Every structure is written in structure tokens, then in C-alpha cells.
């Protein structure tokens, strides 16, 4: 099912890689913008990640690139898709949890219904000491991540306090969704239980 990206919106994919693996993990976010170029949008996301999420992330993991897909995604003149190299590295030295154990962050809007909310799985933020054997994140670490994600999403909306372009996060819809208008994300919530991929770990 294809995601619909209207004019004035973009889909941004943050691509991560562990130094011990060739596999790339991705987090996908939708955003609104005003006449921004793909490098402008990538700069907003890269700057916000470096300011607020790099310190939560394992030193073995790097943000290798941002892929920016511009709207419109349909019609005779669709927007371009550009991959912008990055290379920032996490700054939190840790013995990480297994690669299929991730931070699960819910994205909420002011409108109800499943179509108007979303979630992301963020790699490299959990260690063996912050997750117990049933996948619960320690309350101290969860609260710390909650603050960092609120600040990260806030920085996207403010353009890193005016230093970069404004890119407030929205929920984009696929072509089969009952909702059609992208909705602004007004709150984020770090879940207290990890998100886990169902397939076996592949290096």
C-alpha cells in the first residue's frame, strides 16, 4: 500500500547502521514544510537527531543517511526522492540489547482512530541493564527517553529553534486509508515495553 504524500509534505527516512553489521534499520516520519528542498529537510532532521537522540544511542550505531521523498507522490509531476549522506554516531557507550529489541515510540494526533496515529521503532537505545527479561524498560530510562523524544519532535517543529527549516511531524496516510488529510503529531509516548521484530536476527 503506497503512502500518499501531498504537495507541501515529505516523507523522511532515517537510516541507521551498526558497525558490526551490514544491515540498515530505518525510521520513517512524515512532515510538513514550506517550500523546503530535500537537503533543507534532511538538515532539520539531522540537526535534531544530533542534539537530542545521539546521546541516547549506542556508539556502535551511526545515522548513515536521510532519505527525503517529496510530495506530491502521485500525478504527472511527482516529487523527487533524495538520499542525503549523514554519518553522525551515537555517543552512549553501552552493551546493547539484541538488535531486534528497539524503543517503541507512539505518535498521537488530536483526532481519534487508528488511521490518525502511528509508531516508530528506534534502534540502539536499549542496553542489557535497562531492559529486564520480559522486555520492560526501567522506569528511569523510559522517562529519560521520553524527555529526549519530546525535545526531538519539538525541534523538528521549531526548525531547531529557527536554525533550520520548520518540519513539524505529521501522520501520512496510505491510499486505502479512510483518512486523507495529514494530521499534525501533537504528542509522543515512549512505551515501557520494547518493540520487538518477529523474525530472527540477521547480521
Image (tube, rainbow, N blue to C red):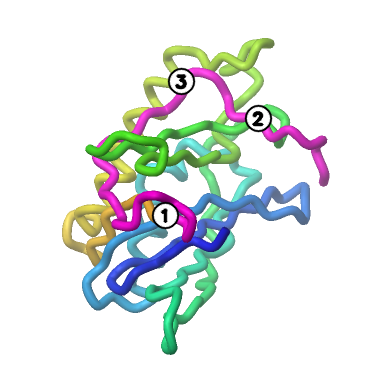
| Residue denoted by label 2 | 196
- The x and y percentages for residue 29 are 43, 53
Residue identifier under label 1: 173
Residue 53 percent coordinates (x, y): 43, 42
The residue to which callout 3 is attached is 141
- Mark 3: which secondary structure? helix
Measure how far apart labels 1 and 2 are at the Cα level.
24 Å
Q: Is residue 66 left or right of residue 98?
A: left
Question: Can you say whether 4 is above or below 80 in the image?
Answer: above
Lower sequence index among marks 3 and 2: 3
- Residue drawn at x 23%, y 53% is 157
Query: Foreground: 56 or 41?
Result: 41
- When asked about the image quadrant of residue 160, the answer is bottom left
User: Residue 72 falls in which quadrant of the image?
Assistant: bottom left
Single out the mark in the foreground, 1 or 2: 1
Span shown in magenta: 174-203
Q: Nearer the viewer, residue 67 or 74?
A: 74
Q: Is residue 197 magenta?
A: yes
48 left or right of 174 in image: left
Most foreground residue, 202 or 62? 202
Q: Which residue is the extreme one toward the left?
A: 162
Mark 3 closeness class: few <14, some 14–19, many ≥20 residues within 10 Å: some
Marks 1/3: CA–CA distance: 32 Å
Q: Provide residue 175's location: percent of width, then percent of height.
A: 47, 60
Secondary structure under badge 1? strand
Give the image location of residue 51, x and y in percent. 35, 48
**Cα–Cα gap, marks 3 and 2:** 18 Å
Q: Are marks 1 and 3 in contact (CB under 8 Å)?
A: no
Q: Kindly identify the residue that appears in the image at 68 percent across and 11 percent down.
A: 133
| Magenta stretch, main secondary structure class | loop
Amino acid at each position: 500500500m503506497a503512502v500518499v504524500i501531498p504537495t507541501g509534505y515529505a516523507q523522511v527516512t532515517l537510516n541507521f547502521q551498526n558497525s558490526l553489521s551490514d544491515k540498515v534499520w530505518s525510521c520513517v516520519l512524515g512532515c510538513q514544510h514550506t517550500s523546503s528542498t530535500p537537503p533543507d529537510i534532511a538538515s532539520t532532521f539531522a540537526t535534531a537527531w544530533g542534539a537530542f537522540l545521539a546521546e541516547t544511542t549506542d556508539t556502535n550505531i551511526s545515522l548513515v543517511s536521510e532519505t527525503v521523498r517529496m510530495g506530491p507522490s502521485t500525478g504527472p509531476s511527482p516529487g523527487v526522492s533524495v538520499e542525503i549522506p549523514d554519518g553522525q554516531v551515537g555517543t552512549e557507550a553501552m552493551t546493547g540489547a539484541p538488535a531486534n529489541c528497539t524503543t517503541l515510540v507512539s505518535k498521537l494526533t488530536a483526532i481519534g482512530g487508528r488511521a490518525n496515529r502511528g509508531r516508530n521503532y528506534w534502534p540502539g537505545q536499549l542496553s542489557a541493564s535497562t531492559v529486564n527479561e520480559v522486555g520492560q524498560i526501567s522506569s528511569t530510562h523510559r522517562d529519560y527517553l521520553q524527555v529526549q523524544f519530546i525535545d526531538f519532535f519539538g525541534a523538528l517543529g521549531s526548525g531547531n529553534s529557527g536554525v533550520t527549516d520548520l518540519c513539524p511531524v505529521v501522520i501520512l496516510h496510505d491510499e486505502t486509508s479512510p483518512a486523507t488529510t495529514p494530521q499534525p503529531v501533537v504528542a509522543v509516548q515512549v512505551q515501557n515495553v520494547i518493540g520487538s521484530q518477529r523474525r530472527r536476527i540477521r547480521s
